[in-house]
Image: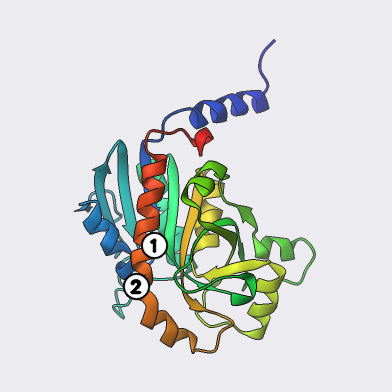
Amino acid sequence: MTPSGDQLEDAVVSHIEDRPISSILIIIAMQTEALPLVNKFQLTEELSMLPKGVPWVCYRGIYKNLNINLIWPGKDLSLGVDSVGTVSASLVTYASIQALKPDLIINAGTAGGFKAKGASVGDVFLASACAFHDRRIPIPVFDMYGVGLRQAFCSPNLLKELNLKVGKLSTGDSLDMSPQDEASIIANDATIKDMEGAAVAYVADLLKVPAIFVKAVTYIVDGEKPTAEEFLQNLVAVTAALDQAVTQVLDFVNGKCLSQL
């Protein structure tokens, strides 16, 4: 009997998940978050895989048995600030997958946390799922498309080994939180909030590349301090916790197959 299309697809997926992970794509939004990892793993800048004219920056190197590619969207060409947000994240993720064909994506970065959900500054979370909170389309089915809920790659052994916190991630293109955003974040049951994760998850899902999301809390969204002030105050210190967590993830992933995560 000739295998059906679904059977062939299942066989391919099974083969991929049983193959040792060798290529890792790390996507990070900000230079401050990226450089500690670049220095720790002695990554070198690589220009050849990037489209001409974009500000994106790619660093490459080898860590143990892993080929590491770390990409950040670079500085805005007009304003000179980090190119944060969902648009840059989507473009960088798509182009990087096409060029590098990674086995696994790690979207690492900082995030806001909700104390009502148990988050504190310095906590590192492994996101269980990602959704948008600022794509409000109040039309049946379009509303679900706007939320864009996607599950992170299931990695129970990684979670157990690293003893990270786990929670849902909500993504939007604003650092602050409007009342409408807050209502959507509550509906998303989110513990952490960022500006890239759900966009990375969308592209990863579209191109069938497993992705995990490692997020370190720099500010408390439902706290007393002004968001921007607390974010900048804690960015460097919390990035050190993020650096450590990503290193632990790579150490765990090294030599394993996707099915072992």
Kindly tell me whether residue 16 is visible in this rendering.
Answer: yes
Please, what is the three-letter code of the amino acid marked with disc 1?
Leu
Kindly tell me whether residue 96 is visible in this rendering.
Answer: no
Residue under circle 1? 242
User: Is label 2 in a helix, a strand or a loop?
Assistant: helix
In which quadrant of the rendered view does residue 3 lie? top right
Please, what is the three-letter code of the amino acid marked with disc 2?
Ala
Please tell me how many numbered marks the rendered image carries.
2
144 displayed left or right of 46:
right
Across and down, in percent, residue 213 comes to: 49, 56
User: Is label 1 in a helix, a strand or a loop?
Assistant: helix
Residue under circle 2? 237
Whether residue 209 is situated above or below residue 53 in the rendered picture: above
181 displayed left or right of 195:
right
Whether residue 256 is situated above or below residue 235 in the rendered picture: above
Q: Tell me if mark 1 has few (under 14), some (14-19) or many (20+) residues whose alpha carbon lies within 10 angstroms of its own.
A: many
Residue at 28% over, 78% down: 80
The color scheme shown is: rainbow
In which quadrant of the rendered view does residue 56 lie? bottom left
Q: Quadrant of the N terminus?
A: top right
Camera-side residue of 117 and 176: 117
Residue at 30% over, 71% down: 75
Across and down, in percent, residue 114 comes to: 59, 74
Q: Return the residue found at the far top.
A: 1
Whether residue 54 is situated above or below residue 45 in the rendered picture: below
Q: What is the C-alpha distance between the residues marked 1 and 2?
A: 9 Å
